[in-house]
Amino acid sequence: EAAVTQSPRSKVAVTGGKVTLSCHQTNNHDYMYWYRQDTGHGLRLIHYSYVADSTEKGDIPDGYKASRPSQENFSLILELASLSQTAVYFCASSGRASAETLYFGSGTRLTVL
Amino acid sequence: GDQVEQSPSALSLHEGTGSALRCNFTTTMRAVQWFQQNSRGSLINLFYLASGTKENGRLKSTFNSKESYSTLHIRDAQLEDSGTYFCAAGLGTGNYKYVFGAGTRLKVIA
């Protein structure tokens, strides 16, 4: 079973502050993703990556940056956190895009005050 | 517009009964995945399908790419089946994204 670990599990940030969410996977997957879930809604793709040192924009990239320093690690960075970025953030990985199961981390609950 | 439409948005089942959840796609999809989000918020893999039907215990899923839909059948529902069920559709060749539906909130009643 693929293992995807997110940290922190929850975080409270102040408006305008910098937030970094981390994701680590141990299954040698090429593809990693960051999704955002708002209460009562589905998941929306923020950024993804299919190789180390490269990231791609998803459907809602504004206000977010991503970093993939190695195959195992994928970070989501909010340079200037805003109230509208309060949400639960999920990291996922897969062996090949659109061809294998997505494995999700447990999520990070971010509250921006 | 939305590429993945899930129905129903909410559903209540008595224990021991069953029902079907559906996802309709507005464009050609290569594959579909189904997930259950439990009360703790964790997303649990249920099925990955590129075509055809898969079954696992009390769950069965079908993906019809030509007619652009997928279904998830639940039979003999149990209390632990409660949660939100999401389908995620994989777009065509060269596209690395999965598009999620808005989910079906299932409540199983004793």
Image (tube, coloured by chain):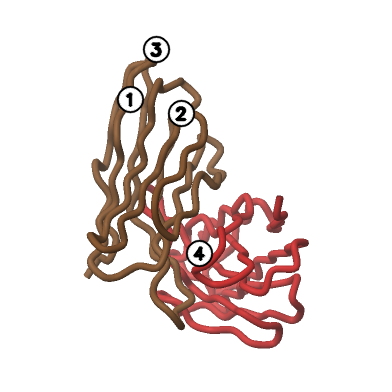
Rendering coords of residue A8 (x, y %): 69, 56
**Mark 2 or mark 3, which is nearer to you?**
2
Q: Which residue is mark 2?
A: B58
Amino acid identity at mark 1: Gly
**Mark 4 or mark 1, which is nearer to you?**
1
Element marked by disc 1:
loop
Q: Which residue is mark 3?
A: B110
Q: Is residue B1 left or right of residue B41?
A: left
Marks 1 and 2 close (CB-CB < 8 Å): yes
The numbered mark, 3 or 1, whose residue comes first in the sequence reads: 1
Q: Chain of mark 3?
A: B
Q: Which residue is mark 1?
A: B18
**Residue neighbourhood size for the residue with mark 4, other residues' Cα within 10 Å, grouped as few (<14), some (14–19), many (≥20):** many
Query: Colour in which chain B is shown?
Result: brown
Residue at 60% over, 55% down = A104
The numbered mark, 2 or 3, whose residue comes first in the sequence reads: 2
Nearest the viewer among A21 and B44 is B44
The residues tagged by marks 4 and 2 sit, at their Cα atoms, a distance apart of 29 Å
Residue at 59% over, 53% down = A107
The residues tagged by marks 2 and 3 sit, at their Cα atoms, a distance apart of 17 Å
Amino acid identity at mark 2: Arg
Query: Colour in which chain A is shown?
Result: red
